[in-house]
Image (tube, rainbow, N blue to C red):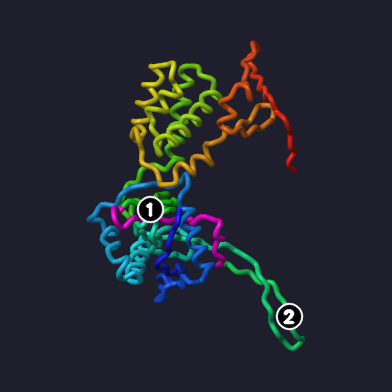
Amino acid sequence: MDIYLKKAIMHIIDRKSGDPVFSQVELDLSTEYIRDYLIKKIQKLASSQTKTGILTEDSAIAQLTKEAEDNFINFSEKFVTRWYEVYQQSEEAPDSDVFVVLYELDTQLYVAFLKIKYTEGFTHYVDTNEQGIQNDLIINRAILGGKSQKAEEGITINLADLSYELIEKKYTFSGEKMNYFSDKVIESKPAPSLEDHVKVIKKTAEEIGEKFNAPSYDLLADVKEAVYDTIEEHGQIDTKQVAEQVFKDNVTARMSFEEEVEEQGLSNQTPMMREVREVSEKKYGKQKLKLSNGIELVVPLDVYRDPELIEFINNPDGTISVTIKNVEEIINRM
């Protein structure tokens, strides 16, 4: 996705000093490494853990976004203040830097909030004393994660339709772990992430399959393939199609699966983030098999589907044989 950065600012969250340290000056977006860092962080918000939703128009955050374009610095302070009022109540939420970014994507205007926690790092320090130059090793406890690492928490909001994509982390508040960002900051209940959705589907399929004596490895392979297929076709998970594909020969099992999934709060077609096909390709485009004898296989879906390339044989003694066929070359990667 092509992201055009318009404005950005960084605020410091040092919980020992109390309130956030607000910057009064925007980041210089003519600096290449700043642009590259922020763009990569925004792109990394699209993952299998990303939740989606739409803010209600009269919510506090939705009202705040009206200032984002014309009064950006003030908007960023208000947004961070609202977030921090909740965040600081956690016993374990760490110090961090937060970035607020205004950007365009496909001619649409968005704002992003990115929380980057600190990591511990070492560096050199050059000092001069009576004995001469002394090179020393020092520790820095406020190093930001590299651009290849995703933000610990973050949200992007489309300013036109108030749709959002959210990565949130549970923290402890008064002894209880909670998703404070969605519950308290934006006050919106997002749709389950792709990962959460698949966990429910997988667990439900296993339970239904066990009732009908379906082989576990075969069933889970079918689930993974069905999830991949429905995302490729529709850009979202269609649980009805998954049921039909996994339990195609068992109407009772199929109906039981659909009922169980619905009871878990998953709708037939749950909206996903924009990059769901790309994420699905990386996460579900291969079957990862671990055999009881210690052998592990990573098999692309198109290979897994082809009996001319791989075959699973149920033996009379209850064991399973895996035959890999028509291999022209074996490469040993160290």
Look at the picture and state if 157 lies above or below 212.
below
Look at the picture and state if 291 lies above or below 317.
below
Look at the picture and state if 130 lies above or below 14.
below
For residue 146: magenta? Answer: yes
Quickly name the residue at label 1. 180
Q: Which residue is drawn at 22% across and 56% down?
A: 58
Real-space Cα distance between discs 2 and 1? 47 Å
Residue 96 image position (x, y, % from top left)? 48, 64
Quickly name the residue at label 2. 134
Question: Three-letter amino acid code at disc 2?
Answer: Gln
Q: Which residue lies furthest to the bottom in this view?
A: 130
Is 16 on the left or on the right of 266, as rendered?
right
Instruction: Give the camera-side residue of 80 and 16.
Output: 80
Residue 263 image position (x, y, % from top left)? 34, 31
Is 34 on the left or on the right of 125, as rendered?
left
For mark 1, give the secondary structure: helix
Instruction: Give the camera-side residue of 95 and 147.
Output: 147
In magenta, the rendered stretch is 142-162
Instruction: Give the camera-side residue of 68 and 206.
Output: 68
For residue 172: magenta? Answer: no
